[in-house]
Image (cartoon, helix red, strand yellow):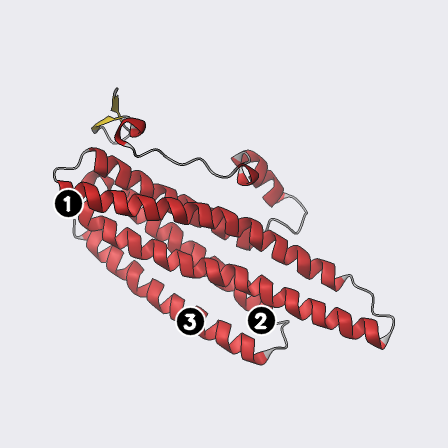
């Protein structure tokens, strides 16, 4: 079946070319309106970390969309092959971001649970402190790992510039900005946990990794912006 897609390209349906958009795991599926209503509620979760990962998943989805349209309209086998490679990685990242959203929410819930532990005796106080520190470390790990995936998304987006047509460049720009925004938001969530952590060695390691990711992201975003502006 022939379709006229959103950019006016004549293309075959995705299923006829083996480029199906994968459905997400059912446990992550909910309506956008329901998620945003939960985000706007007085509940502590979902929060900024979860929202950051949702934004990143939208960036990955946009990147996959651009490459699917490109693959369906490819002028060479090499262009088609390159687009399909990025599609596979972008789809995997989208699923990973959605899974990370759930992990981030659970990690923060563990912090809240640890804070509510009793501290009537010295033993309870020590147990509570240990549980809280472990929970805070995991709560920092979740957005830190997502930040690394956001850098991967930026790298793939830059690669896609070579493959895609000019009509799709604005979507690539959006994908890059979403990835950059998600990383910046994840950074806030890493650092807020550091304020309450007592394991200075872990803080130092996580902080160094985050700084490296931010620097890589800044360079990639600058390169993407310049390249898109020149096309």
Q: Can you identify the residue that label 3 sits on? A: 211
Label located before the other in sequence (1 or 3): 1
Using the rendered view, name the quadrant where residue 12 is placed.
Answer: top left
Q: Residue furthest left?
A: 76
Is residue 58 depicted above or below 104 in this figure?
A: above
**Residue 67, quarter of the rendered image:** top left
Residue appearing at x 30%, y 43% in the figure: 171
Residue 89: image x %, image y %? 34, 49
Q: Which element type, helix, strand or loop, lies under badge 2?
A: helix
Identify the residue shown where x is 66% and y is 52%. 44
Q: Which residue is mark 2?
A: 194
Looking at this view, name the residue that lies furthest to the bottom: 201
Label ID, residue 78: 1
Element at label 1: helix
Looking at the picture, how far across and down is residue 82, in whole percent?
A: 21, 47
Q: Residues within 10 Å of mark 2 (few under 14, many from 20)?
A: many
Q: Residues within 10 Å of mark 3 (few under 14, many from 20)?
A: few
Residue at (35% x, 57% y) in the render? 152
Q: Earlier in the sequence, mark 3 or mark 2?
A: 2
Query: Which quadrant would the N terminus be assigned to in this image?
Result: top left
Q: Is residue 205 above or below residue 175?
A: below
Q: Is residue 115 visible?
A: yes
Q: Is residue 105 left or right of residue 22?
A: right
Residue visible at 18% across and 50% down? Answer: 162
- Pointer 2 or 1: first along the chain: 1
Q: Is residue 48 left or right of residue 211?
A: right
């Amino acid at each position: 079946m022939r379709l006229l897609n959103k950019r006016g390209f004549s293309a075959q349906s995705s299923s006829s070319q083996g480029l199906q958009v994968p459905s997400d795991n059912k446990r992550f599926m909910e309506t956008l309106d329901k998620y945003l209503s939960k985000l706007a509620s007085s509940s502590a979760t979902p929060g900024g970390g979860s929202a950051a990962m949702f934004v990143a998943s939208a960036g990955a989805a946009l990147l996959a969309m651009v490459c699917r349209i490109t693959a369906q309209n490819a002028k060479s086998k090499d262009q088609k092959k390159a687009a399909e490679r990025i599609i596979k990685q972008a789809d995997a990242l989208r699923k990973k971001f959605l899974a990370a959203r759930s992990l981030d929410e659970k990690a923060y819930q563990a912090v809240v649970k640890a804070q509510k532990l009793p501290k009537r005796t010295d033993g309870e106080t020590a147990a509570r402190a240990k549980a809280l520190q472990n929970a805070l470390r995991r709560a920092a790990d979740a957005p830190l790992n997502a930040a690394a995936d956001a850098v991967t998304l930026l790298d793939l987006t830059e690669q896609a510039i070579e493959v895609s047509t000019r009509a799709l460049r604005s979507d690539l720009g959006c994908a890059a900005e979403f990835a950059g925004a998600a990383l910046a938001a994840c950074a806030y969530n890493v650092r807020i946990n550091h304020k309450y952590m007592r394991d200075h060695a872990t803080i130092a390691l996580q902080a160094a990794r985050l700084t490296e990711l931010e620097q890589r992201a800044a360079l990639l975003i600058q390169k993407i912006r310049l390249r898109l502006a020149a096309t």
